[in-house]
């Protein structure tokens, strides 16, 4: 499961759009343990410390939201990157809008069974 949430230029706080998406997937998330990769991205044309900070804060705000709503912080991993990893043409306003995002990837996680003693 991969979700992409677009974020307005310069913003790090997630909007109501994110809560609607989280609610749609919360039942699936709690059926059995999941690892969750949260990736913050920007539309920067090259790496800059300020854009990297925006990408980090986008990922952290998503993680905080999920933890406040019952997800285990131990099951959430963050990743952030600015100045690349585009999903659309970064030379157009529409493409740049798509590239400003947080991605959530739910991954199945199997808990190994403990061997039973005879």
Image (cartoon, rainbow, N blue to C red):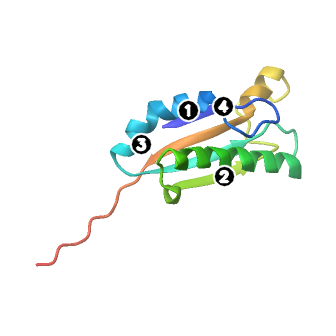
Measure how far apart labels 3 and 1 are at the Cα level: 14 Å
Indicate the secondary structure of the residue bearing disc 4.
loop
Residue at left offset 34%, top offset 60% = 111
Measure how far apart labels 2 and 1 are at the Cα level: 20 Å
Dot 2: few (<14), some (14–19), or many (≥20) neighbours within 10 Å?
some
Indicate the secondary structure of the residue bearing disc 3.
helix
Disc number placed over residue 79 in the picture, else none: 2
Q: Earlier in the sequence, mark 2 or mark 3?
A: 3
Indicate the secondary structure of the residue bearing disc 1.
helix
Q: Earlier in the sequence, mark 3 or mark 4?
A: 4
- Horizontal and vertical percent for residue 67? 53, 50
Q: Earlier in the sequence, mark 3 or mark 1?
A: 1
Residue at left offset 27%, top offset 65% = 113
Q: Earlier in the sequence, mark 2 or mark 1?
A: 1
Front residue of 57 and 100: 57
Front residue of 59 and 48: 59
Image: 113 above or below 14: below
Front residue of 30 and 84: 30
Quarter occupied by residue 66: top right
Dot 4: few (<14), some (14–19), or many (≥20) neighbours within 10 Å?
few
- Position of 19 with respect to 115 (left or right) is right
- Closer to us: mark 3 or mark 1? 1
Residue position marked by numbered label 3 in the rendering: 29
Residue position marked by numbered label 1 in the rendering: 19
Disc number placed over residue 15 in the picture, else none: 4
Residue lying farthest front? 68
- Position of 84 with respect to 112 (left or right) is right
Marks 1,4: beta carbons within 8 A: no
Quarter occupied by residue 94: top right
């Amino acid at each position: 499961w991969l979700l992409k949430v677009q974020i307005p230029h310069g913003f790090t706080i997630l909007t109501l759009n994110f809560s609607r998406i989280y609610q749609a997937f919360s039942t699936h998330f709690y059926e059995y343990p999941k690892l969750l990769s949260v990736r913050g991205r920007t539309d920067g044309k090259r790496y800059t410390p300020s854009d990297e900070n925006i990408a980090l804060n986008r990922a952290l705000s998503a993680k905080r939201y999920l933890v406040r709503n019952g997800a285990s912080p131990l099951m959430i991993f963050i990743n952030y990157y600015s100045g690349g990893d585009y999903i659309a043409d970064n030379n157009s306003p529409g493409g740049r809008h798509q590239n400003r995002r947080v991605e959530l990837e739910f991954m199945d996680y199997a808990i190994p069974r403990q061997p039973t003693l005879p």
